[in-house]
Amino acid sequence: MFWQPTSLQEAVRLLADEGGILVAGGTDVFPALVDRPSPAGLIDLTRCAELKGIAIGADAIRIGAGSRWSEIARASLPRGLAALQAAAREVGSVQIQNSGTIGGNLCNASPAADGVPPLLALDAAIELVGPHGLRRLRVGDFVLGNRRTARAADEILSAVLIPRRLEAGGSAFLKLGARRYMVISIVMVAVTLVPGPDGRIADARVAVGAASAAAQRLGGLEARLIGTDPVGSAPADLVSAADVAGLSPIDDVRASAAYRLDAARELVGRAILQAWEAARA
């Protein structure tokens, strides 16, 4: 069966009554169905207006879960969201950016999902809507591991919320792969830094993806960056081996675990310098 609800309320009802697989861009769902039995049903969310659009509110920026990556990349957003827009421009290929959605990227929960590190670094939350109402979770509490999330079977991810208190800072996103596009990342990092009145870092958020079952923030490094001014530092001097020791990368055909740790350390250092330059501009 194939359903095309025209409202979020109708989609929630269909999911509760009929079950089935939720589809928006389909860039993850359809490849996963190759050589597998056809699902009992598909619920196409593309006609649900509540899942679309980007709105800047008093306290948060709301990005509809059905927003395409290309829409996010082109949107007029505060400079503090530069990391998210940079990630949007590097998801898959141009064709995938025109189809894939931010909500699908989160729900797919790949360890190498480009959208997760910048959302962690921006302290983003998500909204889930189901038969019992709406609930909110921070992204770090939603993405639990490799292909695992906190979404209940009868819930739909409706929006991403980014607090405006970080928009005055600077952010950066960097990723390493065998090529620029259409690549599963070896490692990716996102950093958000907010300057204080003394010209030093007042708030720091650092996240690393593709180096653990789920992207992680580096809390120890964040705490150590507070009160510092990284201008003139070399990337390697900003991040120690201990800062990335909590990551748990794997060995695979793309890179060894040791290489991923070294790459994470270097990329985080570079991203700190880029984010700080943007924050001070």
Image (cartoon, rainbow, N blue to C red):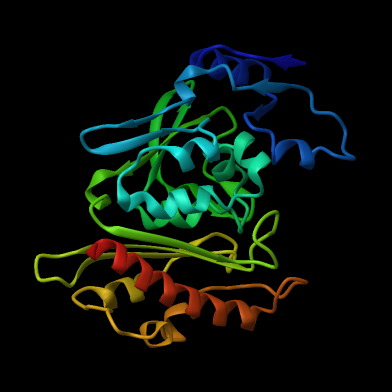
Q: Is residue 74 visible?
A: yes
In this rendering, would 199 be left or right of 6? left
Quadrant of the snapshot with the N terminus: top right
Could you tell me which residue is drawn at 54 percent across and 49 percent down?
89
Q: Is residue 135 above or below residue 199?
A: above
Lateral position of residue 40 relative to residue 131, left or right: right
Q: Nearer the viewer, residue 260 or 277?
A: 277
Residue 59 location (% of width, % of height) = 22, 38
Q: Give the image location of residue 159, x and y in percent.
A: 43, 33
Which residue reaches farthest left?
Answer: 197
Residue at the location (18% across, 75% down)? 227
Q: Is residue 23 left or right of residue 235?
A: right
Q: Residue at x 59, y 64 (%)?
A: 210
- Residue placed most toward the observer, 74 or 170: 74
Quarter of image, res 209: bottom right
Q: Tell me if residue 145 comes above or below residue 153 in the rendering.
A: below
Q: Can residue 246 be seen in this view?
A: no
Instruction: Give residue 12's quadrant in the image.
Output: top right
Quarter of the image with the C terminus is bottom left
Where residue 165 sits: x, y (%)? 22, 49
The structure residue drawn at horizontal position 70% and vertical position 68%, both measured from the top left corner, is 178
Seen as rendered, the residue at the extreme front is 281
